[in-house]
Amino acid sequence: MRNRIMRAARLLLCAAAAHLPVSASAAGWTSSNFELVVLSDAELSGRSINVIHMGNVELTSGRIVAADPLAQPDRPALARTVAPGAYPVTLYQAFGRIAVAGMRFAEGKPDHWELAVLPGQDPATLKDDEIFGYPVDAGVGCYMDAETLALIDEREAQVQAQKPDADINYYDDVLAADLDANKGTYALHRPVAGKKGNVAVFWSGWGDGFYPVFWGLDKDGRALVLLTDFGVIENADGKREPKLQ
């Protein structure tokens, strides 16, 4: 069943390297856009960045999947977990693209940032030109709980039952209607009405590629925010588009 909603994922690490304004550090890779999460909407507007408050993602288990939901809906959850709950997602838009997607777990300014990894991944093993992240092959990224995949499968089965002789495509048959309501830019998608568990879906900056995810942590290592950098801006500033490398 899942094969019908999965497209071939591009797994090469540098698929979008020319577009990523991230820089190497002694601890691996970092982003120049971390400041976004502590700026007010007014301050961001002054930097030509539009803020989209999507609403809350329901994390029923606290195991977060950051992925292209069409290419890799069954991608493993991130190694770090959070308490189950509903958490707000904020999109930062510049040059007509979603530049950064963040999810907040608690208030406060992060004390430090870590590259988000899957179980078994170790940033210390990365070379200067490598990064952990997720591949995008359908032009969108997402945040969702790992348990929400079962609801996506359930929704697909419902659509297939209504069209038993059709080849079901989850984007065309389900997700497109939600995205169209927001000019195709983003959607807070609920796979099954009445069931807890939804998906924050959003354009992935330059489209298909490979994008890093970061945890913003307080001084005690508690997760405050999760951030995906789509490589559209640098230095938390949307006034001048970065030059491609």
Image (cartoon, rainbow, N blue to C red):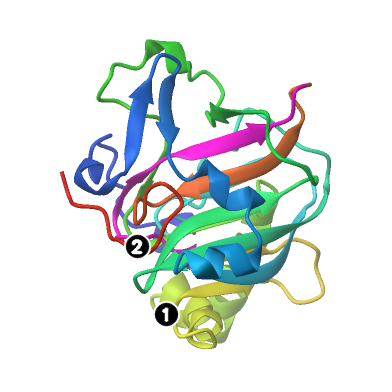
Q: Is residue 37 above or below residue 113?
A: below
> In terms of sequence position, does the residue under pointer 2 or pointer 1 come before the other?
2
The magenta segment: 202-219
Which one is in front in this view, the residue at disc 2 or the one at disc 1? 2
Mark 2 closeness class: few <14, some 14–19, many ≥20 residues within 10 Å: many
Classify the position of the C terminus by image quarter: top left
* Residue occupying image coordinates x 28% and y 34%: 13
Quadrant of res 241: bottom left
- Front-lying residue, 11 or 52: 52
At a point 25% along the width and 25% down the height, the residue shown is 129
Residue 19: % across, % down = 25, 49
Report x, y in % for residue 80.
67, 29
Whether residue 164 is visible to the viewer of this picture, yes or no, is no
Q: Give the labeled residue for mark 2.
A: 138
Q: Residues within 10 Å of mark 1 (few under 14, many from 20)?
A: few
| Mark sitting on residue 241 | none
Q: Secondary structure at mark 1?
A: helix
Q: Is residue 59 magenta?
A: no
Q: Does 126 sit left or right of 220 as displayed?
A: left
In the depicted structure, whether residue 127 falls above or below residue 223: above
Q: Amino acid at mark 2?
A: Ala
| Residue at the (65%, 49%) spot, across then down | 38
Which residue matches tag 1?
A: 172
Q: Residue at x 44, y 69 (%)?
A: 48
The three-letter amino acid code for the residue at tag 1 is: Asp
